[in-house]
Image: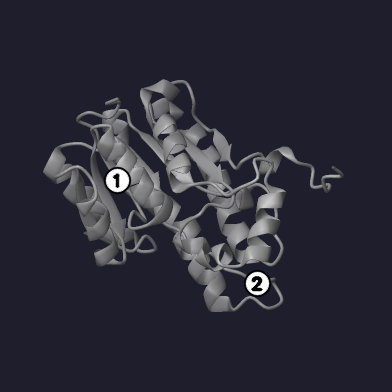
């Protein structure tokens, strides 16, 4: 399958987890992929595991608009166009409003919310020119609340509603803008949970499909939304959550 032959794709936070799986998926479907991140060694490992020459790395911090703008400019200069942006870079911040450190609050907003805005702002002129698309990686935490994750919920909620507003504003420009909203996913970000059998069992019990997602499953949904198969879809926030958001929160009596 080569849905993205000759397409140029930028994936932020492409050095691990969902970002790495997404970059690999696009590369396998014929795209030239540019991955950004702050850890160059991680980016190099992802590029080395992909088809030869299919992935280019760019060390960049998504909380810095100028760095993202420079990545977009270099990409367009090298390839002549940009077709897809995947805003995936993100961090988790844990804590209630009462105990959340102000620096942690600001950091999660800078990366998870402002980084999404910065990526879209930098890429949109070129995506308008190509009739391209954007897929933002938000979270079920952007449409439902969590215990002790006030900052993350605020950032992902903002990124979710930003996706909807942007989709409305730029439909007239021929740019489709959607989001995927994963639930618990087995990535490096959740390593602390993966080693805690009690917590892992509790997480799995909350998911109707009975397990966490694999990054490749999120990547498949991202690739679908970015592809021509989704040509009449914009402003969608697609839960890729094993059924989590299907629940009203009551315990399973079975």
Instruction: Locate residue 32 relative to residue 233 in the image: left or right.
Output: left
Asked if residue 230 shows in the view, the reply is: yes
Farthest residue, direction right: 253
Q: Which mark is residue 10?
A: 1
From this view, report whether residue 220 is shown above or below residue 37. above
Q: Which mark is residue 202?
A: none
Residue at point 17% right, 50% down?
Answer: 74
Looking at the picture, how far across and down is residue 16, in whole percent? 37, 57
Image quarter (top left, top right, bottom left or bottom right) of the N terminus: top left
From this view, report whether residue 60 is shown above or below residue 95. above
Image quarter (top left, top right, bottom left or bottom right) of the C terminus: top right
Residue at point 67% right, 46% down?
Answer: 207
Looking at the picture, how far across and down is residue 178, in whole percent? 48, 36
Q: Secondary structure at mark 2?
A: loop
Mark 1 touching mark 2, by CB under 8 A?
no
What is the CA distance from the residue labelled 1 to the residue labelled 2?
32 Å
Q: How many marks?
A: 2
Q: Which residue is mark 2?
A: 95
Residue at point 27% right, 26% down?
Answer: 2
Of residue 14 and residue 108, the one placed in the foreground of this image is 14
**Scheme of image coloration:** one colour
Q: Secondary structure at mark 1?
A: strand
Please identify the quarter of the rendering in which residue 229 is found: top left
Question: In terms of sequence position, does the residue under pointer 1 or pointer 2 come before the other?
Answer: 1
Please identify the quarter of the rendering in which residue 188 is found: bottom left
From this view, report whether residue 115 is shown above or below residue 3. below
Looking at the picture, how far across and down is residue 136, in whole percent? 46, 44
Looking at the picture, how far across and down is residue 13, in whole percent? 37, 56
Asked if residue 126 shows in the view, the reply is: no
Q: Residues within 10 Å of mark 2 (few under 14, many from 20)?
A: some
Of residue 126 and residue 138, the one placed in the foreground of this image is 138
Q: Residues within 10 Å of mark 1 (few under 14, many from 20)?
A: many
């Amino acid at each position: 399958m080569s849905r993205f032959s000759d397409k140029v794709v930028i994936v932020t936070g492409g050095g691990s987890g969902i970002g790495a799986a997404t970059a690999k998926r696009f590369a396998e479907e014929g795209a030239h992929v540019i991955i950004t991140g702050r850890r160059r060694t991680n980016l190099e490992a992802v590029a080395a595991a992909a088809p030869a020459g299919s992935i280019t790395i760019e060390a960049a911090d998504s909380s810095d608009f100028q760095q993202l703008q420079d990545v977009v400019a270099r990409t367009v200069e090298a390839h002549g166009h940009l077709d897809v942006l995947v805003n995936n870079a993100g961090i988790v911040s844990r804590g209630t409003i009462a105990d959340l450190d102000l620096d942690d609050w600001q950091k999660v907003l800078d990366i998870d919310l402002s980084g999404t805005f910065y990526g879209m702002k930098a890429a949109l002129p070129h995506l308008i020119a190509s009739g391209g698309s954007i897929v933002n990686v938000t979270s079920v935490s952007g449409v439902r609340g969590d215990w002790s994750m006030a900052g993350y919920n605020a950032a992902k909620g903002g990124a979710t509603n930003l996706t909807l507003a942007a989709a409305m504003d730029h439909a007239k420009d021929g740019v489709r803008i959607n989001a995927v909203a994963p639930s618990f996913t087995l990535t490096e970000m959740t390593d602390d949970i993966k080693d805690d059998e009690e917590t892992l069992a509790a997480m799995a019990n909350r998911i109707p499909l009975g397990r966490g997602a694999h990054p490749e499953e999120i990547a498949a949904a991202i690739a679908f939304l970015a592809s021509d198969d989704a040509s009449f879809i914009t402003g969608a926030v697609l839960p890729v959550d094993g059924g989590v958001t299907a629940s009203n929160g009551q315990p399973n009596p079975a």
